[in-house]
Amino acid sequence: MDDITEDAVLDGRVRLRQPARGYRAGADAALLAAACDAADGQRVIEAGCGAGGALLAAAARRPGARFTGIERDPKAAALARENATLNGLEARVEVVEGDVVHRFSGLGLEHFDAALANPPFFDDPASLRGPAAERRDAWLADDGLAAWTGFLTKAVREGGSITLIHRADRLGDLLSLLGDKAGSFQVRPVHPFADEPAKRVLVRAIKTGKAPLQLLPALVLHDRDGGKHTAEAEAILRGQAELGWT
């Protein structure tokens, strides 16, 4: 990959080398990492890890857990491995080349305790103008959201958790697609401002879970007083607070 930048994330706890052009890890990756609640000794898989923005931040937040990233782009996978080494996390973080459109069993991996994903936001290329070629894989799911939810439910053991961040207007699709194999849904809306509709949702499900759906308090990212983030969002993005599920 040409034109690589090195950025400090999680208040400097993680150094992330990523393409200067194309998809770059941002708030969605940070929130996904903050939503990871893996316990010590558990194994976590992230589908579509890219250069490792969410994967490495989650690993830094959860030092007792082990992480595996799945990435179909060989260059991005190589960069994620470099980033794991750069941050001294190579003993707990591995990156495997693979595609969610293929069977999980084909990867030769044991089932995981938890799965994370920030799936591409669009299924239909006609639904948006662009994106630039270098961002296409991050924005467009070639086989649709169903391929991602199907992979994630296969990747975790019974009782394992699946955590995703996605567009708020796809919440119904997420619940429907996951509902055949998972339950005990928890949904946390993410609002750009307190007086605007949610643009993102964080969704957590348990494979074979039976508990009623919970709609949790919303996270508001920005205020109208000139600050970049609300105090709550700033603490979460810096790694000073968790984005819990209770």
Image (spheres, rainbow, N blue to C red):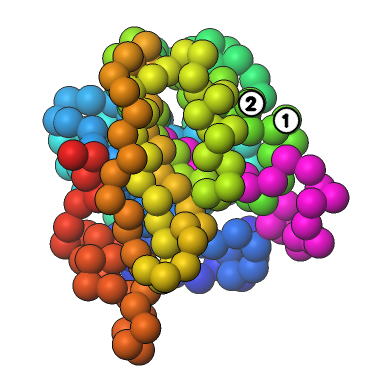
Q: Which residue is drawn at 59% across and 33% down?
A: 173
Q: Nearer the viewer, residue 239 or 231?
A: 231
Residue furthest to the front: 195
Q: Please tell me whether mark 2 sits on a helix, a strand or a loop.
A: helix
Amino acid of disc 2:
Ala
Magenta segment boundaries in residue numbering: 116-137
Residue furthest to the bottom: 226
The disc at residue 147 is 2
Question: Taking 64 as reference, is 7 left or right?
Answer: right
Q: Please tell me whether mark 1 sits on a helix, a strand or a loop.
A: loop
Which residue in the structure is indicated by mark 1? 143
Q: Quadrant of the C terminus?
A: top left
Q: Which of 207 and 5 is in front in this view?
A: 207
Q: Quadrant of the N terminus?
A: bottom right
Question: Taking 124 as reference, is 241 left or right?
Answer: left
In the rendered structure, are the residues bearing label 1 and label 2 in contact, judged by CB atoms less than 8 Å apart?
Answer: yes
Residue 191 inside the magenta-drawn segment: no
Amino acid of disc 1:
Asp
Badge 1: how crowded within 10 Å, few (<14), some, or many (20+)?
few
Question: Taking 25 as reference, is 214 left or right?
Answer: left
Q: Which residue is drawn at 40% across and 44% down?
A: 202
Residue 67, position as x, y percentages in the image: 33, 34
Badge 2: how crowded within 10 Å, few (<14), some, or many (20+)?
some
Q: Is residue 165 above or below residue 1?
A: above
Quadrant of the rendered structure where residue 241 is?
bottom left
